[in-house]
Image: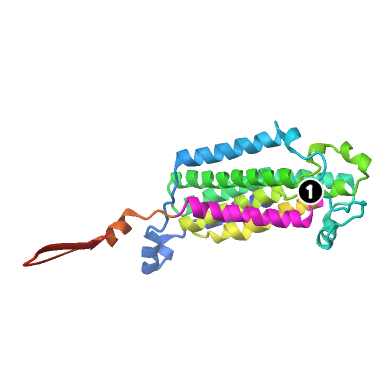
Amino acid sequence: MPTALCFLALASLAAAPVPSEALPSGAQQAADAPTLQALDFNWTREGIITGTAGLLWIASETVFKDELAPATCRWCDRAADGTDTLNALDRWGRGVAAETPEGRDRWDLWSNIGGFGLLPAGVLGGQYLLSSGSGAPPRYYAEDATIIIETAAVAALVNQVVKFSVGRERPFVHVLPEDQKPLTKHPTDNNLSFYSGHTNMAFALVTAAGTVSELRGYKNRWLIWAVGLPAAASIGLLRMGADKHYLTDVLVGAAAGTLFGVGMPLLLHGRQEAPATRAARMSMNVSGGLGGVVFSGQF
């Protein structure tokens, strides 16, 4: 699957330095000027948020899933008399699903490999190449990676809460006779369709990396958007191909992941004001007269 390779190849091109002799004098001065921004970051805070969200998500997916997952659907897309009430958009979107069980299993496998392996590796690897290619100190990448993982962990935990609460029946379960629904490979997973966790995490990772790159001011940061967003969308298509999610599940997953990916870095990790900038804003005026001396200034 080329997702991670695309990230790394394009990011490595972005990281390649331009020879100084190829730049005119004015451009050379601009290139030499420090443009990277420090972000608000606290290792203790980020460790607590990331660790807590990650542990709760993993526990809900493993240890407590049997107790938390709804045994029957709450959102079944059927009327009380059993009539199918699935909306037209989702009915149309199911045309993406593979026709055979083997095909659906193959799409499912690739969505897991891509969503939890290749895409995260590509995002973090691409972020490293962008930061190092922009001349950032190593600690910037360590902070960037932590922010990206923190965002994905929180987004995944919120997604899990929504899934367990809503209890939407998955597409492949929806078409089964009632007596066959408890016989699926993972019955506890039958009613966790809304919204797509794979898509949510993919968009959270990509948009968090893109937002952090924008805040930092990395060179060629547009690449994370140009490559990452289509790659994240491909994860959603794979989930639909596996018949695990409806189109609306994927669209909401993409929107939720983007909300966290953009919102968390902006809210928790905005740009720090450089000391030089603060010093430049400080001024003091002294005026005197018969009545005394007056000090005024801007700090």
Residue 149 among magenta residues: no
Q: Quadrant of the C terminus?
A: bottom left
Q: Is residue 98 left or right of residue 221?
A: right
The number of numbered discs placed on residues in the rendered structure image is: 1
Mark 1, secondary structure of its residue:
loop
Q: Residue furthest left?
A: 290
In magenta, the rendered stretch is 241-270
Give the residue drawn at x 84%, y 62%.
88
> Up-down: is 71 above or below 287?
above
The figure's colour scheme reads rainbow
Say if residue 159 shows up in the picture: yes
Q: Residues within 10 Å of mark 1 (few under 14, many from 20)?
A: many
Position of 145 with respect to 162 (left or right) is left
Q: Residue at x 32, y 59 (%)?
A: 277
Residue denoted by label 1 = 168
Residue at (54, 50) in percent of width and height = 127
Which quadrant of the figure has residue 288? bottom left
Magenta part, dominant SS = helix
Where residue 173 appears, as percent x and y from the top left, is 86, 46
What's the residue type where badge 1 is placed? Arg
Q: Position of residue 33 (x, y in %)?
A: 37, 60
- Between 112 and 192, the one nearer to me in the picture: 192
Residue 11 in picture, x, y percent from top left: 56, 54
- Residue 285 lies left or right of residue 71; in this view the side is left
Where residue 252 appears, x then y in whole percent?
Answer: 70, 56
Q: Is residue 6 visible?
A: no
